[in-house]
Image (spheres, rainbow, N blue to C red):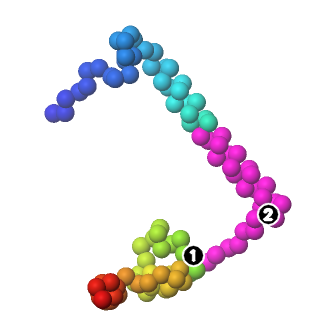
């Protein structure tokens, strides 16, 4: 059996005085509100830039989506294509051996 914690760390302050748990709930609520408010502000600024044509948005087909390299499980052929588009070298075993040989020379 898992032992239960008998006393919460939030029950008392450093001096050992009892603390109202609603105080901590209120702080968390305030922090969440401020975080959401900051995101809403950023989104409204972004939206404004799009409307004023400071930023232009374009649809990019998944075939050319370079961010997919970091977010999806892709096949070797697709990874090789994207690595090439990014101007990177492929890190196959042969390539790593060649790089090691170049450094050792």
Rendered location of residue 7, percent (x, y): 29, 20
On screen, residue 99 versus residue 22, left or right, reads left
Q: Residue at x 81, y 60 (%)?
A: 51
Q: How many numbered circles are shown?
A: 2
Residue 51 among magenta residues: yes
Name the residue tied to disc 2.
54
Mark 1 lies on a secondary structure that is loop
Relative to 46, residue 89 above or below: below
Which of disc 1 and disc 2 is earlier in sequence?
2
Name the residue tied to disc 1.
65
Q: Which residue is drawn at 39% across and 16% down?
A: 13
Res. 93 visible in picture: no
Separation of residues labelled 2 and 1 (CA atoms): 22 Å
Can you tell which quarter of the image residue 20 is in? Answer: top left
| Residues in magenta, as a range | 35-61
User: Which one is nearer the viewer's eye here, 101 or 87?
Assistant: 101
Q: Residue at x 53, y 27 (%)?
A: 27
Rendered location of residue 96, percent (x, y): 32, 84
Rendered location of residue 33, percent (x, y): 61, 35
User: Which one is nearer the viewer's eye here, 74 or 91?
Assistant: 91
Can you tell which quarter of the image residue 102 is in? Answer: bottom left
Res. 40 visible in picture: yes
Q: Which residue is drawn at 52% across and 83% down?
A: 87
Rendered location of residue 81, percent (x, y): 49, 86
Q: Mark 2 or 1, which is nearer the eye?
A: 2
Mark 2 lies on a secondary structure that is loop
Residue 89 among magenta residues: no
* Residue at the limit of the structure toward the front, as seen here: 105
Quadrant of the frame with the N terminus = top left
């Amino acid at each position: 059996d898992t032992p239960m914690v008998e006393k919460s760390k939030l029950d008392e302050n450093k001096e050992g005085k009892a603390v109202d748990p609603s105080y901590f709930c209120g702080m968390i609520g305030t922090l969440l509100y401020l975080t959401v408010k900051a995101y809403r502000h950023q989104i409204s600024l972004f939206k404004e830039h799009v409307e004023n044509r400071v930023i232009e948005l374009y649809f990019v087909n998944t075939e050319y989506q370079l961010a997919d390299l970091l977010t999806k499980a892709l096949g070797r052929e697709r990874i090789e294509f994207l690595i090439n588009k990014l101007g990177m070298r492929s890190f196959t075993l042969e390539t790593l051996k060649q790089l090691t040989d170049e450094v050792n020379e």
